[in-house]
């Protein structure tokens, strides 16, 4: 019969069949009438047996086609090119007739048929994966465990894994192009089927590789791999390919390592703050500050910048880095206080235990030598001030820029800045307290001798004394104030010098103010107090002008609050401007 003839011909064809367009078209041409005859129940038992054998061979041929759909090449006698060769970015001409033949043998609308075709395509993707991964097998094999790799080998390994990510990405792009040609039935999404395999296989390889060759810190080759993995995940999303369980999760792959890096960075920086590792106790920078702080903040800044790639992908780590930076900054301040402990100890009785409290009066010790602000104290205060105004701000600026990219959760951005604000308050408090304590020591100097004690001078001024006589009474006090101002100028930077002088000026004016407040009902002594207040003011203004010259600003010479209040009582100045310009 005609069916028998076609079956015998088909049987011979299948013995030499290749996954080519010509062969598959011939198989399709022979198979159509045979299957029609079978549906009409016109085949004999022998013909059915031959057809069954042919179907088995056809299934093998189809499996060969679909499992190697990227290696199909009509120019090769076998119909298949080397799997490691270049891949065409379009569907092979053999694919369309192969799908037609498959549709003859299977109901393509059935889930069973779809699963068979999907399995073929998944096998193809696994083959391609295996081919790409061969070059990185040495790094994840059991035999490589326990071997120490040199830096060149490690960077080479990371480069190979990075290239693997790119190669897998190229495979998926090719699948997307093939899918767009609509060779497969609409129920078969080639790009999603293959991408699921590629994503899970690549994720497994990356996890094994990172475990075998763990990244110790965000070195360039590590960052390059991190970028490649992250970009791979982003591309999947941009291509509309849904995530699959066990597939690429770039942040999940690197999270634990990033946390270890940050912890190691913290320990490394804290170790530099240990007393035995803090050098340069007697050396200062051109800012009159401790080199230790400059070095440490440079290290913090450099360490943070290493995380730019991480933050550009996952800005959430900004909050963790902020916390780490704040811990190290506290350690820097603590280390500075230990380094200058001998100089700071005499001041600690003058520093309030609570914030925003006024410095308490110092106990008068007439037998004690006059206090002079040591150079080391100047270095310490200058350092704290520079950290506050410059170094801390540099760190905060880096973190704040990153925080601007933090995702919004429930209409609110993740809380950033709390730790930085705490450090700012800490630094401002340290600066203010130590500067105030130093000034109060100088004020205490004026109480050590009756001839320099301003309150006693005010009490002894007679009502009929002239300004020249009051100035003579205050000669020793003014001389001592002048020496103290010179002392402040020698140890502090210009900005701190002006602030400390104004505070010193205010403290001296407070003595006059309290004297006047105690005599509100008795105006005796007002004239002498007026002279004394003016003399104190002249002393500070002239010395500040002499030492600072043209760098003094108009606001630097404004009368402090206590002077204004004293003038108000004296009714010589009706100014109501209660300037609070003490701390710069």
Image: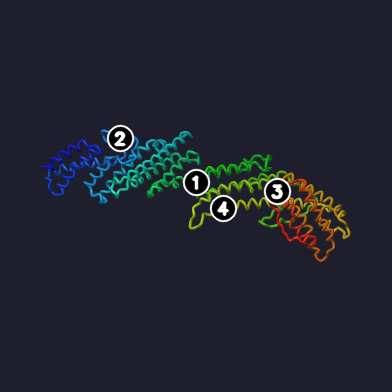
The answer to which quarter of the image holds residue 202 is top left
Q: Crowding near pointer 1: few (<14 within 10 Å), some, many (20+)? A: few
Secondary structure of the residue carrying tag 1 is: helix
Badge 4 or badge 3: first in the primary sequence: 4
- Camera-nearest residue between 437 and 184: 184
Instruction: Identify the mark at residue 312; answer none if there is no mark.
Output: 1
Q: Residue furthest front?
A: 181
- Camera-nearest residue between 377 and 247: 247
- Residue 128 image point, x, y percent: 34, 39
Q: Is residue 275 left or right of residue 60?
A: right
Q: Point out the frontmost of discs 4 and 2.
A: 2
Q: CA distance from mark 4 to mark 2?
A: 60 Å
- Residue 477 image point, x, y percent: 82, 51
Q: CA distance from mark 3 to mark 2?
A: 79 Å
Q: Is residue 390 left or right of residue 502?
A: left
- Give the residue drawn at x 30%, y 48%: 188
- Give the residue drawn at x 77%, y 52%: 444
Q: CA distance from mark 1 to mark 2?
A: 42 Å
Q: Residue furthest left?
A: 1
Which residue matches tag 4? 417
Which residue matches tag 2? 81
Badge 1 or badge 2: first in the primary sequence: 2
Q: Is residue 199 left or right of residue 405?
A: left
Q: CA distance from mark 1 to mark 3?
A: 39 Å
Badge 4 or badge 2: first in the primary sequence: 2
Q: Crowding near pointer 2: few (<14 within 10 Å), some, many (20+)? A: some
- Asked if labels 2 and 1 touch by Cβ distance under 8 angstroms, the answer is no
Instruction: Identify the mark at residue 496; answer none if there is no mark.
Output: 3
- Residue 18 image point, x, y percent: 24, 37
């Amino acid at each position: 019969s005609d069916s028998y003839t076609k079956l015998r011909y088909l049987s011979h064809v299948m013995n030499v069949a290749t996954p080519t367009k010509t062969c598959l078209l011939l198989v399709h041409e022979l198979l159509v009438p045979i299957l029609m005859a079978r549906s009409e129940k016109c085949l004999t038992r022998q013909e059915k047996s031959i057809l069954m054998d042919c179907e088995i061979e056809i299934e093998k041929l189809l499996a060969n086609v679909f499992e190697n759909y990227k290696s199909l090449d009509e120019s090769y006698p076998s119909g298949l090119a080397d799997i490691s060769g270049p891949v065409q970015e379009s569907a092979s001409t053999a694919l369309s007739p192969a799908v037609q033949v498959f549709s003859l043998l299977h109901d393509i609308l059935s889930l069973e048929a779809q699963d068979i075709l999907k399995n073929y395509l998944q096998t193809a993707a696994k083959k391609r994966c295996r081919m790409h991964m061969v070059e990185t097998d040495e790094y994840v094999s059991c035999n490589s465990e326990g071997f120490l790799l040199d830096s060149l080998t490690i960077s080479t390994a990371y480069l190979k894994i990075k290239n693997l990510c790119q190669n897998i990405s190229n495979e998926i792009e090719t699948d997307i192009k093939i899918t767009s040609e609509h060779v497969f039935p609409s129920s078969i999404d080639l790009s999603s089927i293959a991408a699921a395999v590629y994503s899970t296989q690549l994720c497994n390889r990356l996890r094994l590789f990172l475990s075998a060759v763990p990244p110790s810190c965000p070195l360039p080759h590590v960052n390059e791999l991190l970028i490649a993995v992250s970009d791979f995940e982003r591309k999947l999303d941009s291509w509309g390919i849904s995530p699959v369980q066990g597939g690429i999760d770039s942040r999940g792959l690197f999270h634990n390592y990033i946390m270890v890096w940050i912890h190691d960075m913290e320990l490394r920086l804290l170790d530099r703050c240990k007393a035995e590792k803090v050098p340069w106790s007697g050396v200062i920078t051109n800012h009159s500050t401790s080199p230790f702080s400059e070095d440490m903040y440079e290290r913090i800044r450099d360490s943070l910048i290493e995380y730019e790639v991480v933050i550009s992908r996952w800005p959430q780590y900004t909050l963790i880095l902020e916390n780490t930076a704040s811990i190290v900054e506290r350690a820097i301040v603590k280390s500075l206080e230990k380094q200058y402990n001998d100089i700071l100890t005499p001041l600690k009785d003058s520093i309030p235990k609570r914030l925003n409290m006024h410095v308490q009066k110092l106990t008068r010790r007439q037998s004690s030598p006059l206090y002079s602000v040591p150079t080391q104290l100047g270095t310490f205060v200058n350092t704290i001030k520079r950290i506050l105004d410059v170094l801390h701000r540099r760190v905060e600026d880096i973190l704040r820029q990153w925080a601007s990219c933090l995702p919004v959760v429930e209409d609110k951005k993740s809380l950033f800045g709390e730790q930085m604000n705490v450090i700012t308050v800490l630094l401002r408090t340290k600066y203010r307290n130590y500067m105030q304590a130093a000034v109060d020591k100088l004020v205490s100097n004026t109480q050590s001798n009756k001839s320099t004690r301003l309150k006693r001078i005010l009490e002894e001024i007679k009502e009929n004394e002239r300004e020249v006589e009051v100035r003579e009474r205050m000669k020793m006090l003014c001389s001592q104030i002048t020496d103290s101002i010179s002392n402040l100028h020698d140890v502090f930077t210009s900005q701190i010098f002006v602030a400390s002088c104004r505070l010193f000026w205010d403290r001296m004016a407070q003595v006059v103010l309290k004297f006047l407040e105690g005599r509100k009902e008795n105006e005796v002594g007002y004239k002498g107090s007026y002279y004394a207040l003016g003399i104190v003011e002249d002393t500070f203004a002239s010395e500040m002008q002499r030492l600072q010259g043209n760098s003094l600003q108009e606001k630097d010479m404004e009368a402090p609050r206590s002077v204004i209040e004293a003038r108000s009582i004296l009714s010589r100045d009706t100014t109501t401007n209660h300037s609070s310009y003490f701390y710069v």
